[in-house]
Amino acid sequence: METKLLLAPMAGYSDVGFRVVCAQLGADLTFTEMLSAQAMKYDSEKTKALAFRDAREKAVVAQIFGKDVQAMAEAMQNPILQNFEGIDINMGCPAPKIVKNGEGSALLKNLSLASQIITECKKYAGQRSLSVKVRLGFSENNIVEIAKMCEESGADFITVHGRTAKQMYAGKADYEAIAAAKASVKIPVFGNGDIVDEQSYQNMLLCGVDGVMIGRGAVGSPWFFSELKREKLSMGKFEVIKTHVEVLRQFYPERFLILHLRKHFLAYAAKLHAPSSVKQKFALQTNIDESLNLFQSLVNHFENN
Ligand SMILES: Cc1cc2nc3c(=O)[nH]c(=O)nc-3n(C[C@H](O)[C@H](O)[C@H](O)COP(=O)(O)O)c2cc1C
């Protein structure tokens, strides 16, 4: 199987516009940010808005989170998730408010419940793939046990972020542990954590993984996927930013986007080596078109120097 490049689910970042540009620049599969199964029960408008899709997207996986078997099974049947190519179950989020609820990475402390959730969700997957995103364990590394549990419960593939939940984002992702996960199961295993350049990408490939998932390395630089594939960029960097904005404008009101785009703009500016005075302008932007003009000159400058 050819190595696949996946865009990670990232709350606040993996919006439909970002997914479109990542797909156009080489991501084979993109993920939505995590969607609450509980919120779907109550027909949450916010959750619906996180599940918008654009016709230009290729394959997209919607990620769901929850701890209640019934609510997760119902989420699988929710109309807003029917037109995705896959559904992923979040068993990796270490955020205290999620863990306190027994959701996300807390499920790694209760593998029999985790298994029940996967088995039940699989029943309603239909044509969609059913995958699980995990960490190495909750406090200790027991990834081999976790990977086998996912496989036995019916997961079509897993993604392993090479840290325990307790580590949050500290230290370095443990690629040897990812290699052990890959060696322990037959289903495809995707490696995730700290892929930020060619070297880290090659190191991850040495684990024998079927593909890699990239999060922070793509924020502000969705062209990272093309670079890793050694493909010429299919569009200029300014066009990337403009397309990201144009897609979002089809779905969301301007006042929401002014705030939402600040963090993406800051990330683009950082990757384009903007001076801090310019970054400050993006962080406080009040007008998206003015920011786009600023990007046009930034990209011109960046490309001519
Ligand atoms: C801002 C942010 C939001 C995230 N949100 C999610 C999420 O919704 N679901 C999930 O499974 N992981 C989430 N993650 C974890 C990433 O998917 C990924 O596992 C992690 O960042 C490590 O990969 P990286 O080093 O390539 O960024 C998030 C990470 C970041 C930085």
Image (cartoon, rainbow, N blue to C red):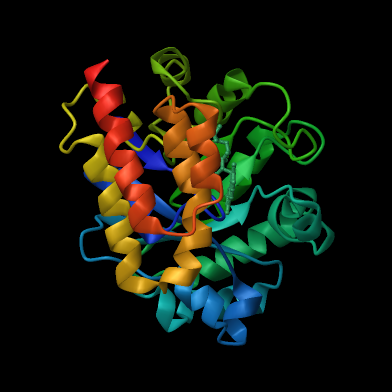
In the displayed structure, would residue 61 be above or below residue 81?
above
Residue at horizontal 73 percent and vertical 38 percent from the top: 137
Q: Quadrant location of ligand 1?
A: top right
Q: Position of residue 157 (x, y in %)?
A: 45, 46
In the displayed structure, would residue 142 be above or below residue 41?
above
Q: Which of the two residues, 59 or 295, is positioned nearer the viewer here?
A: 295
Report whether residue 185 is seen: no
Residue at horizontal 38 percent and vertical 32 percent from the top: 210
Residue at horizontal 42 percent and vertical 37 percent from the top: 268
Q: Which of the two residues, 16 or 171, is positioned nearer the viewer here?
A: 16
Question: What quarter of the picture does the C terminus occupy?
Answer: top left
* Tally of numbered tags: 0
Q: Position of residue 217 (x, y in %)?
A: 47, 31
Report whether residue 291 is seen: yes
Residue at horizontal 59 percent and vertical 40 percent from the top: 147
In the displayed structure, would residue 117 be above or below residue 20?
below
Question: What quarter of the picture does the N terminus occupy?
Answer: top left
Q: Which of the two residues, 288 or 166, is positioned nearer the viewer here?
A: 288
Q: Which of the two residues, 148 or 75, is positioned nearer the viewer here?
A: 75
Q: Position of residue 188 (x, y in %)?
A: 42, 39
